[in-house]
């Protein structure tokens, strides 16, 4: 409009004289085609140059502003010409800073590392913004008038009125082989006092999941070393298997054992600690180092003491790092411990950003929060390098309620769940896997022939035992056949008991299953089953090493091999007669 008058503010340490003021007004009038009211505000931080703000745009003629222009100019030259040094010498002589208007926003409010910014009309979701003197943040919500951002530096002093600048960059995670064996934060910065990490690439933390055409079927086993899982609920490379249960029922233990079991199997492991205690993270690193697992593992930590914004970023940063290895043909195992705390962190951020709360006060997009994370796990086709990323998300329930909002969501996203039962855990059955509620939707496709043959009717036998065990509480007299079945079931349950950080190799698991389902321990007291199985495995390893080698290397065994294993086990069983 012709009668419109724009207000411009000139920030500088020295007030401009009348002649300089007229030049400023003339420039702005020609640039914007309207009358301009120019005000001057003293800013002692600007010793050389000035900063001119009009509307949402800023002309930055400070030393820092001109230096930024020079850096961008050098970057442009580097992209256009490989002979950079002579080109720089030639062009920098003639370079002069340009008067360019940059869109600069202003912080309206800040609360718990969540800032609301106005004046950035061109901001986009996931963009990195720079607050004040260098504090970085990421755009989380965008509306016509303002955008919501999360701050990366939770200790920084960002106040209302702080200027905010664009970077045009997507939030990302530095990646490289140098991360193996390290403990880092959600920004990829080392927190293990082992020095700087040399990175190779910078990947966006948010990335589209691989397309269906770029995936292959999940058919290669990723063994956990835990008999109860590998035999009944096998996990395949590229699968997403949820570990779910109440607090202190051994969820993290299963994930840690699985990481330890990948030693020597050319699998890279990433453990994302979300909202965990610092003592847990240090204990995890120590346990993995003790068992030689840190050499192929990266721990990404956002501890309970850190802001919700950092806890929100951690699993996406870990996933970006996992994708880096997967796209280079590697097999990756990634653990998210745990996503219920991640959902709580996201709920806190969303409420601070003014989003409408829904069920259990979570925002409506909380399903998308985890689906866009877990869907990135896949087994890529050979055309894409053949790599895989297997996800083990962990979710905590309250009083075993798997129908709560977050557990329900993640169960529907994943390819199965390992449900850990509180009563089983406290009765000494560890891992406390509930056979009835646990499932793997990949099933036998992710098992070797040896494991598939050896497991046979294990799940059915255990289900029948659990049913008979309940019935037994209401009966005072039992016939001999029922007693034998109960004894057999008790033996199976004792066989599935396994110490923490003691994963079994494949031939050990197969030998134990053949002994159990071959009724080799029918006459052995339940409390002696573990001892018997150890001796039986050692005898087979000593007498028939070729059978063990065949199972480990080729994943199979013959009927004759099975007979030899049962014969060896029966000879050991005679000691318990």
Image: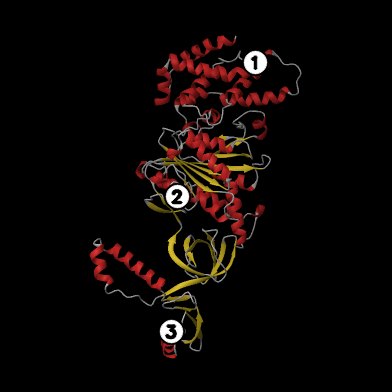
Element under disc 1? helix
Residue 170, image x and y in percent?
44, 59
- Circle on res. 47: none
Rounded to the nearest angstrom, the CA distance separating label 1 from label 3 is 95 Å
The residue wearing badge 2 is 320
- Residue in the picture at 40% in, 73% down: 63
**217, above or below 208, in the image:** above
| Residue 145 or residue 257, whichever sits in front | 257
Which coloring applies here?
secondary structure
Element under disc 3? helix
The residue wearing badge 3 is 28
- Residue in the picture at 63% in, 28% down: 429
Rounded to the nearest angstrom, the CA distance separating label 1 from label 2 is 53 Å
Mark 1: few, some, or many residues within 10 Å (few <14, many ≥20)? some
**282, above or below 199, in the image:** above
Mark earlier in primary sequence (2, 3): 3
- Circle on res. 484: 1
Element under disc 2? helix
Q: Are marks 1 and 2 in contact (CB under 8 Å)?
A: no
- Residue in the picture at 67% in, 31% down: 426
Residue 30, image x and y in percent?
41, 86
Rounded to the nearest angstrom, the CA distance separating label 2 from label 3 is 45 Å
């Amino acid at each position: 409009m012709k009668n419109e008058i724009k207000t411009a503010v000139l920030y500088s340490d020295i007030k401009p004289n009348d002649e300089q003021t007229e030049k400023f007004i003339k420039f702005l009038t020609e640039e914007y085609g309207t009358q301009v009211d120019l005000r001057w505000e003293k800013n002692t931080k600007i010793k050389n140059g000035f900063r001119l703000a009009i509307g949402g745009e800023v002309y930055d003629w400070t030393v820092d502003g001109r230096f930024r222009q020079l850096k961008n100019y050098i970057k442009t030259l580097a992209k256009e010409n490989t002979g950079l040094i002579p080109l720089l010498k030639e062009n920098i002589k003639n370079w002069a800073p340009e008067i360019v208007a940059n869109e600069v926003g202003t912080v309206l409010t800040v609360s718990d590392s969540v800032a609301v910014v106005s004046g950035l009309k061109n901001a986009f979701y996931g963009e990195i913004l720079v607050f004040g003197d260098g504090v970085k943040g990421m755009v989380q919500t965008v509306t016509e008038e303002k955008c919501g951002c999360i701050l990366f530096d939770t200790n920084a002093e960002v106040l209302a009125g702080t200027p905010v600048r664009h970077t045009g960059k997507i939030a990302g995670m530095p990646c490289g082989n140098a991360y193996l064996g390290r403990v880092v934060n959600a920004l990829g910065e080392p927190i293990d006092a082992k020095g700087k990490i040399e990175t190779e690439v910078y990947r966006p933390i948010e990335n589209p999941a691989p397309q269906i055409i770029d995936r292959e079927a999940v058919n290669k086993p990723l063994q956990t070393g835990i008999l109860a899982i590998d035999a009944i609920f096998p996990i395949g490379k590229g699968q997403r298997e949820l570990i779910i249960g109440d607090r202190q029922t051994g969820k993290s233990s299963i994930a840690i054992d699985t990481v330890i079991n990948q030693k020597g199997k050319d699998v890279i492991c990433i453990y994302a600690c979300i909202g965990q205690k610092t003592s847990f993270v240090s204990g995890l690193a120590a346990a993995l180092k003790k068992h030689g697992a840190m050499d192929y593992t990266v721990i990404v930590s956002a501890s309970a003491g850190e802001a919700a914004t950092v806890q929100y970023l951690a699993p996406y940063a870990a996933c970006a790092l996992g994708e880096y290895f997967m796209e280079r043909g590697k097999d990756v195992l990634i653990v998210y411990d745990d996503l219920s705390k991640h959902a709580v962190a996201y709920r806190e951020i969303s409420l601070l950003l003014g989003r409408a709360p829904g069920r259990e006060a979570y925002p409506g997009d909380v399903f998308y929060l985890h689906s866009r994370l877990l869907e990135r796990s896949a087994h890529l086709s050979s055309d894409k390098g053949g790599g895989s990323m297997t996800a083990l998300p962990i979710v905590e329930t309250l009083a075993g309620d798997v129908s709560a909002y977050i557990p329900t969501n993640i169960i529907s996203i994943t390819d199965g769940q390992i449900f850990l039962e509180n009563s089983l855990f406290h009765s000494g059955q560890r891992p406390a896997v509930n056979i009835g509620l646990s499932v793997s939707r990949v099933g036998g496709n992710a098992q070797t022939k040896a494991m598939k043959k050896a497991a046979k009717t294990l799940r059915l036998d255990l289900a029948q035992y659990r049913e008979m065990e309940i019935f037994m509480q209401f009966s005072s007299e039992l016939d001999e056949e029922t007693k034998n079945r109960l004894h057999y079931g008790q033996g199976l349950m004792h066989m599935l008991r396994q110490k923490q950080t003691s994963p079994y190799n494949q031939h050990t698991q197969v030998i134990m299953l053949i002994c159990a389902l071959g009724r080799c321990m029918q006459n052995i007291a339940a409390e002696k089953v573990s001892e018997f199985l150890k001796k039986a495995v050692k005898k087979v390893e000593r007498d028939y090493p070729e059978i063990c080698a065949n199972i480990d290397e080729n994943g199979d065994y013959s009927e004759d091999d099975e007979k030899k294993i049962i014969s060896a086990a029966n000879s050991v069983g005679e000691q318990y007669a």
